[in-house]
Structures are given as C-alpha cells and as structure tokens.
Image: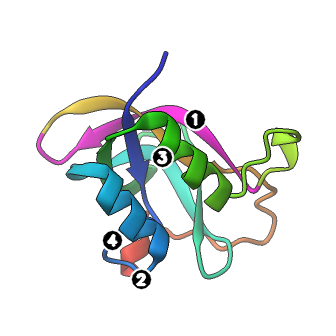
Amino acid sequence: MNSDYLFVYGTLLKDTTNNEMSKFLDTHAEFLGRGYFKGRLYKVAWYPGAVNSDNESDKVYGALFKLNNFDSVFKVLDAYEGISENDPDSSLFKRELVTAFLDDGRTLKTWVYLYNQLLDGLPCIESGDFLKL
C-alpha cells in the first residue's frame, strides 16, 4: 500500500524551529490538520523519536500533510532523517505506514518516520507532544 500523506511530530513541524526542512515540507505539501498516532515519543537529543505502540493511551501528537510530489519529497526527507537505502537496519529512522487520527475526526493511512535505534536510557516524553517540552 502507498500513501501521499506524511505525519510529522518533531523538527518537521513548522512551529518548532526555523528549520530548512520544515520550510521545505511547507512548500511541497498541504497541511491537513493536527492529530495523533498510537505510539510513544522519546527525547533522543535536540530532536524526538517515536515508536509504535499497541497501547490505546500511548499517543504521539503532530500534524498531517498531503505531499505534492511523493517521490521527490521523500528523497529529500529520507536523507534528512538518516535513512540508508544500503543498510536500513542501521538507519537512524525508518519510514512506515501508520493510522493517523485527525482532530477533525478523519482517519488516514500515512507515512511517519519512526526511531530505528535502541531506546535504552532515552527519556520518554509522557505528553506525546514535542511542542510541550
């Protein structure tokens, strides 16, 4: 299955930092709204990392975008997120499809960048919201 949607929860949010990649995303995608997916959020360094969770109370909050050009946008964002095509297991993040629940009630299958390294010692962001740090 494929999707033209991307859920972001960290440095790609336009209201986090004056980040070139958040500006890139804002230029190449349409903002659809805020929402969450079922996951847990951790503080990796100056940026967060999320992982999937089956627990209904675990939520990662962020924003959903519809991409204007799937292939070209993901080529740039995959490089930014540290995804290695040659060695995906060692990549900092991996891109996976999840179900996002938007604040307006819509539910969409969307891509999200999930943290792909060990969580040992990383503090959990209990609120699930990087903007509330």
* Mark sitting on residue 122: none
Residue position marked by numbered label 1 in the rendering: 96
Q: Secondary structure at mark 1?
A: strand
Cα separation, mark 4 vs mark 1, equals 21 Å
Place of residue 74 in the rendered image (x, y in percent of width and height, measured from the top left): 53, 44
Residue position marked by numbered label 3 in the rendering: 73
| Secondary structure mostly taken by the magenta-highlighted segment of the chain | strand
**Three-letter residue code for mark 1:** Glu
Quadrant assignment, res 69: top left
Cα separation, mark 2 vs mark 4, equals 7 Å
Residue position marked by numbered label 4 in the rendering: 14
Q: Secondary structure at mark 2?
A: loop
Looking at the image, residue 114 lies above or below residue 110 = below
Instruction: Specify the segment rendered in magenta.
Output: 92-104
Cα separation, mark 2 vs mark 1, equals 24 Å
Is residue 93 a member of the stretch shown in magenta? Answer: yes
Cα separation, mark 1 vs mark 3, equals 15 Å
**Position of 2 compared to 36: left or right?**
right
**Three-letter residue code for mark 4:** Lys
